[in-house]
Image (cartoon, rainbow, N blue to C red):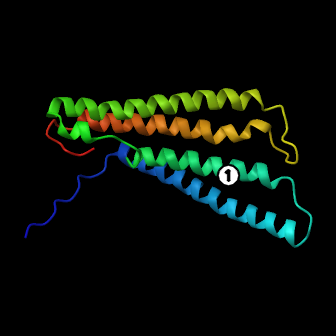
Amino acid sequence: MSEATPPPPATPLQRGMDLLSNAAIAVAVAALLGLVVVQGWQVIARYVINDSPSWTEPVTVLLLTTAMSLGAAAGVHTNRHFGFFLLADAARPQLKKLLHAVSPLVIAAIGAVMAYWGAVLLFDGLDIRIAGAPMPQSIGYLPLSLGGVLMVVFALYRLLLVLRAPLTDEAR
């Protein structure tokens, strides 16, 4: 029985990307926990105290958008996103590398669009207040924009890994 070879030591760039991804996951987890607390308070305030607060809905939407956007970005880093690798796996090595390089490029393009338009929508509504909450109406676009930026960063890093990999490497 042979022993598995240990993975190569992580580069400073890999450690930085892992740290950034772990931070995104930590913020997403905190947002989900905050979501549970806010919705729990909403239920207690509405059905026990009979005085439903108006701020819970916009805060819930913000927390949900934060968890979704940062979680999706972390999924790009860990390569746990949708991918259609059947064609690439059946191709010869040179074409396989090209097809595996297209995936992070598409993800980076989508992330760039999310980051740009999220920022445009964020800045467009900063001076308008949400009814019932002391927040800008467009604050929900902030996590969308940040998640898009992180998707671009992680996708470009994945592209770098694909381009550095030898032609015979089967790893995605």
Q: Position of residue 12 (x, y in %)?
A: 36, 45
Q: Nearer the viewer, residue 156 or 58?
A: 58
Quadrant in which the N terminus is drawn:
bottom left
Residue at image coords 58%, 39% = 146
Quadrant in which the C terminus is drawn:
top left
Q: Position of residue 53 (x, y in %)?
A: 87, 58
Residue at image coords 71%, 49% = 61
Residue occupying the far left of the picture: 1
Label 1: few (<14), some (14–19) or many (≥20) C-alpha neighbours in 10 Å: many
Q: Position of residue 105 (x, y in %)?
A: 38, 30
Q: Nearer the viewer, residue 95 or 171?
A: 95
Q: Position of residue 73 (x, y in %)?
A: 49, 44
Residue at image coords 28%, 35% = 100
Residue at image coords 61%, 39% = 144
In the displayed structure image, the side of residue 44 where residue 114 appears, left or right: left
Residue 16 visible to an observer of this rendering: no
Above or below: residue 149 compared with residue 63: above
Q: Nearer the viewer, residue 3 or 53?
A: 53
- Name the residue tied to disc 1: 63
Above or below: residue 144 compared with residue 67: above
Q: Quadrant of residue 31?
A: bottom right
Above or below: residue 81 compared with residue 121: below
Three-letter amino acid code of the residue under disc 1: Leu
Residue 71 visible to an observer of this rendering: yes
In the displayed structure image, the side of residue 170 where residue 44 appears, left or right: right
Tell me the SS state at disc 1: helix
In the displayed structure image, the side of residue 11 where residue 63 appears, left or right: right
In the displayed structure image, the side of residue 44 where residue 105 appears, left or right: left
Residue occupying the far bottom of the picture: 48
